[in-house]
Structures are given as structure tokens and as C-alpha cells.
Amino acid sequence: MGAPPTPTLPPSRGKGVSRRLAIASGFALAACGPRANGQPVSGPVPPLKSLAPFPIGTCVQARFLDDPAYAALLTEHFSQLTAEWEMKMEYTVQDDGSFRFDRPDAIAGFARRHGLKLFGHTLIWYAQAPAAFVNLDESRTSFARAYDNYITAFVGRYRGHASGWDVINEPIKDDGSGLREHLWSRRLGEIDHMVRAFHVARAADPDAVLLINDYNLESNPAKLDQYQRLIDRLLNAGAPITGIGCQTHCNADLPAGALTRTINALARFGLKVHVSEMDVSIVRAGGWFVSREEKEAAQARLYAEAMSAFAALPEQQQFAFTIWGVRDPESWLVKEDRSDTPLLFDAGGRAKPAFLAVEAALRD
Ligand code: G3I
């Protein structure tokens, strides 16, 4: 995923914030007030998942699970695991077309042993087109067979454990002008490849929630509009979509109200909603003149806003709230800039003010 553009939303015109958000934001500010640089919260904090009536998820890599401190933090606070990359084609589909399940199974096994849900991410993504598919002969039949076989193999393998799947990931162009073109759309049709993927996934698991997922919906109104149009088109074409993912990779300068408006807009379909990959970048936020403390307070407010908006949804629409990583150094954003601190726990696994803000939003 490219670097999300700095949000260009006009100043927030939200209808004000809920009581829940006002309280959470107050905690966030208090938590950031006396501490310089968003120092960790002193003293114990409650398990996040114990405060939520819905799953609190995070992304993991198989190699992290062997770290006792990481595993303890993971099992204490989270109730659903998403493979950050090892259930994607880049890992699972080998050049000869065979599949490897070792690390997906390791993650699934860890989740099962600790009574955690597993979330399947992701089946079809423009960003991953393995050689095994690219090199398939030109016939549509053989390509379609391989496509169906891959989806069936993975969704079927975790049937009864995976709570759901990101069937189609990031279908909208970054500028919101239309649908991405890629191997899958070229070989099986712009809309048809998506409808097909949902039907094949449904056949492989009658119970899993089947989702579409995209990012920058809160910062790019054109992209949100295109995403909503696509969901309408797919539903009208009979695709068995039962959930909508909003990745929620934000920058700390995102205007207040944008997250609430986006989550509520997506909820209007009446399907389940998944805040699927939330993090709040400090470094990517503009405003060189804004201090790090102010950016960390803004980060806490944004986490609180997203949690408040999600927790206010009807219970039957609350699929999960997933944060894209546990401790700051493990974030994908740190590969880009080591000074970024986008998550709820610091390098030592200590809760940050953003954690308090999420806790307050859940308690209200
Ligand atoms: O760990 C291996 C290492 O052993 C190996 O030497 C190295 C070179 O091959 O690869 C390392 O794995 C990398 C992995 O991240 C762990 O760092 C993969 O190459 C790399 O592709 C993978 O990147 C992931 C990326 O998706 C692509 O799958 C990021 O961790 C992950 O955070 C990112 O997540 C995406 C979501 O799936 C979709 N939404 C956007 C989000 C952020 O880009």
C-alpha cells in the first residue's frame, strides 16, 4: 500500500461528538498532559478485550509467537488474530502452484490453543499476483479453476475457526476514480472476479463472514464514494457479502469527525462492519509546527473516536475492531520510519495514552 496522502479533508463539520467520545478524548488529553512524549501509562491496565462485547483483533506474524512477552500481551488484550502477511498469496502460493500452510497453521494453532478467533486476510488482492497464476496458460477455464481451487483450499481449511475472510482487498484506485485493474480483473472480469470469489468462499464456508476491505476511506471522500458504489454493485450482482472492512490506517492530523462519518456511512448497508487495520501514524501526520505531544494527544483522540463510533453501532453490525499490531516497533509503519509510534503499546509492551483513550471509549 502506498503512503496515504496527507488528508485533505476540509475542517471537520461533524455534528459535534458523542458523550462517549468527549469522555474518551478527555482521558486522552489527561493521559498526554503531564507526560512528555506520550510516556507509557504507569500501573496495570485492564485487558482490552474484557471491556468490549465484540472481538478486539490485532495482526500477528508467526515468528512473534515464540516471544513469551509478546504472546502474553497478545493473549491478555486481544480476542482475534489476523495474519499480517502469512495467509496472503505472497507466502502461501509457491512458484509451482503448490500451497504452503505451515505458518498459517501455526497462527491458527496458536489462536485455537488460546481460545482466540482467527480472521482470514486476504484472498484476492491487486498487490499480489504470484508467478504460479501469472504463468498459467491463457485459457480462462484453467485460470478460473486455479482461482476457485485456491479460495476453496484456504477458506475450507479454516472452516469452523475463521470468523471471516477479507475476500476482496483494496479494489478501489487510490484517487477514488474507479476500480483497480490487475491480473484477477483482466483474467476473470472487473466485477465477475469479485462476485466469483465471494460465491466460492461461501461454498467453502457457509458460516464465515465474507468481507470486502479498503483503506483511506476516512481521508478520501472520492474513494469512500467509489467503495460504496462498488458494494452496491456487488450486492445487486448477488455477491454474498456479509461484512464491510474499513482498514483505518490514519495519520494523526486526520480531522475530528471523519472516522465517525465513515464508519456510520459504511454501516448504512446494514452489514457487519470491521475496523480492520487501525493504526495512527505520528510521523506521517503533517504540521511540522505541531509538537510530538500534541500529535500523540491527537492519536489518542482518533483511536477514541473510532472506538466510540464502532461501539455505537448496532450489536449485530459489530464484527470486530482490529488494531494493526501490538507493540510500536512491530508496526509496518516502523519499516518506513523507525521513530513512528502508531499503536497502543510501546516497545516495552507498556500501555500508552492511546490505550487509555480506547479504554475510556469502551467504558462509557
Ligand atoms: O519476515 C520476512 C523475512 O524473513 C524475509 O527475509 C523478508 C524478505 O522476503 O520478508 C519478510 O516478510 C515481510 C513481512 O511483511 C514481514 O515484515 C514480507 O516480505 C512483506 O511483504 C510483508 O509486508 C506486509 C504487507 O502487508 C504485504 O503483505 C506488511 O507486514 C503488512 O503490514 C501489510 O499489511 C497491509 C494489509 O495486508 C492490507 N492493508 C494495508 C496494510 C499495510 O500495507
Image (cartoon, helix red, strand yellow):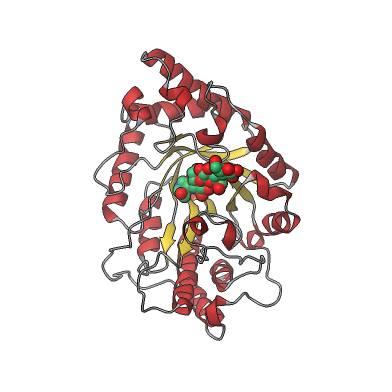
Name the one closer to the observer, 165 or 149: 149
283 sits left or right of 58 in the view: left
Q: Is residue 84 visible?
A: no
The structure residue drawn at horizontal position 37% and vertical position 28%, both measured from the top left corner, is: 184
In-front residue for pair 158/364: 158
123, above or below 246, in the image: above
Is residue 150 found left or right of 109 in the rendered image?
left
**Where residue 347 appears, x then y in whole percent?**
63, 65
Q: Residue at 48%, 79% (x, y): give it.
A: 293
Q: Horizontally, is 103 left or right of 265 in the view?
A: right
Instruction: Out of 124 and 17, give the one closest to the viewer.
Output: 124
Q: Residue furthest bottom?
A: 34
- Residue 190 locus on image (x, y percent): 31, 30
| Residue located at (30% from left, 44% from top) | 173
Which residue is farthest left? 177
Visible residue check, residue 37? yes
Quarter containing the C terminus: bottom right
User: In the image, is residue 240 above or below residue 265?
Assistant: above
Quadrant of residue 235 within the rendered picture: top left
Q: Is residue 319 left or right of residue 11?
A: right
Q: Position of residue 343 (x, y in %)?
A: 55, 63
State whether residue 28 is above or below residue 166: below
Residue at (45, 63) in percent of width and height: 281
Number of callouts in the render?
Answer: 0
Q: Nearer the viewer, residue 95 or 150?
A: 95
Q: Position of residue 334 (x, y in %)?
A: 51, 59
